[in-house]
Amino acid sequence: MVFVVMTPRWNLLGRMSPILKLYSELKLRIKVRRTLAEYNRYRYPEVKADIVSFSKGEIRIVFSGPFCRTCGFYDYFEDYGVILEKAGIKVEISKVEEFENGAIVLFKILA
C-alpha cells in the first residue's frame, strides 16, 4: 500500500511550501545545467561557460577561452541569456567582471 501525502502549495501566511520551493529550485538548476551544455555544444572551443555560483535570484557564469574581445565581446553573454529565455528562464545581465581570458557574468533572474 502506498500513501501519498499532499502538501498545500501555499501556507496560511501566503508563502510557498518548503517542499515545493525546493522542487522549483531543483528544476531551475537542472534547466541552467542543460542550457550550459547546449551553449558549450555550439561555442566550444572558442568560448566555454561554467557555473561559478547559483544563489537565490542570480546565476554567476564564467566565460573563458580565446574568443574575440574587440568586437562582439558581450554578444557571447547575451547569447547565453537568449538560450536561458528559450528554456523559460528570464534573465538580465547585471554585472560583468572582465579578466585576462574571459569574464564572470552575473545574470539576475527576473520573475
Image (cartoon, rainbow, N blue to C red):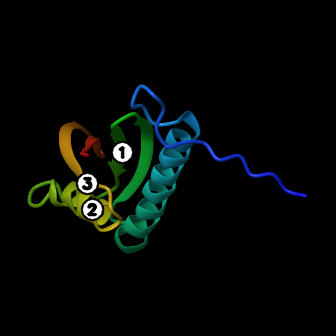
In this picture, residue 22 sits left or right of residue 79: right
**Residue under the point 45% across and 59% down:** 31
Checking the image for residue 85, the label placed there is 2
Label annotation for residue 62: 1
Q: Is residue 47 left or right of residue 22?
A: left
Residue extending furthest toward the right: 1
The mark lying in front, picked from 3 and 1, is 3
> Decide: marks 1, 2 in contact (CB < 8 A)?
no
Q: Secondary structure at mark 1?
A: strand
* Quadrant in which residue 58 is drawn: top left
Q: Amino acid at mark 3?
A: Lys
Q: In the rendered image, which quarter is residue 45 located in?
A: bottom left
Q: Nearer the viewer, mark 1 or mark 2?
A: 2
Earlier-in-chain disc, 1 versus 2: 1
In the image, which disc is placed on residue 90?
3
Tell me which numbered mark, 3 or 1, is placed earlier along the sequence. Answer: 1
Residue 99 position within the rendered picture, expressed as x and y whole percent measured from the top left: 26, 37
Q: Amino acid at mark 2?
A: Glu
Q: Is residue 95 above or below residue 29?
A: above
Mark 1 crowdedness (10 Å alpha carbons): few <14, some 14-19, many ≥20: many
Which residue is outermost to the left?
71
Question: Residue at coordinates 33% horizontally, 37% vertically from top-left?
Answer: 57
Q: Can you say which quadrant of the picture contains the N terminus?
A: bottom right
* Horizontal and vertical percent position of residue 13: 41, 25
